[in-house]
Image: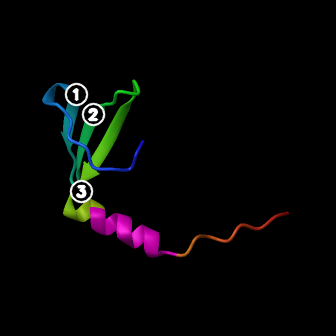
Amino acid sequence: MTRTAELVADRRIRSVVNHPTHIALHVECPCGGVHVYRTGRRWESARRAAAARPAPELTSA
């Protein structure tokens, strides 16, 4: 929520999933939700490439 780096207790980590492009860490938040944090070199490069692409133009009919 605050967009800041915060340390979390081990007991707050619900699962860790190893994907081919990244590792997904599911963390229980004090807000009551579970947030997913992804990390990995291929995940970051794919995310940067998608951000660099121009947005598709929407046409109204």
Q: Which residue lies furthest to the left in this view?
A: 10
Which quadrant of the structure image shows residue 46?
bottom left
Report crowding for label 2: few under 14, some 14 to 19, many 20 or more residues within 10 A (C-alpha). many
x 19%, y 37%: residue: 16
The amino acid at mark 3 is Thr
The amino acid at mark 1 is Arg
Magenta stretch?
44-53
Callout 3: helix, strand or loop? loop
The amino acid at mark 2 is Val
Asked if the residue at tag 3 contacts the one at tag 1, i.e. Cβ–Cβ closer than 8 Å, the answer is: no
Task: List x then y, in percent, for residue 31.
Answer: 41, 27
Q: Disc 3 or 2, which lies upstream in sequence?
A: 3
x 20%, y 64%: residue: 41
Report crowding for label 1: few under 14, some 14 to 19, many 20 or more residues within 10 A (C-alpha). few
Q: Distance between the residues labelled 3 and 2?
A: 19 Å
The quadrant of the picture occupied by the C terminus is bottom right
Magenta stretch containing residue 46, yes or no? Answer: yes
In the rendered view, does 16 fall on the left or right side of 52?
left
In this picture, is 32 found above or below 41?
A: above
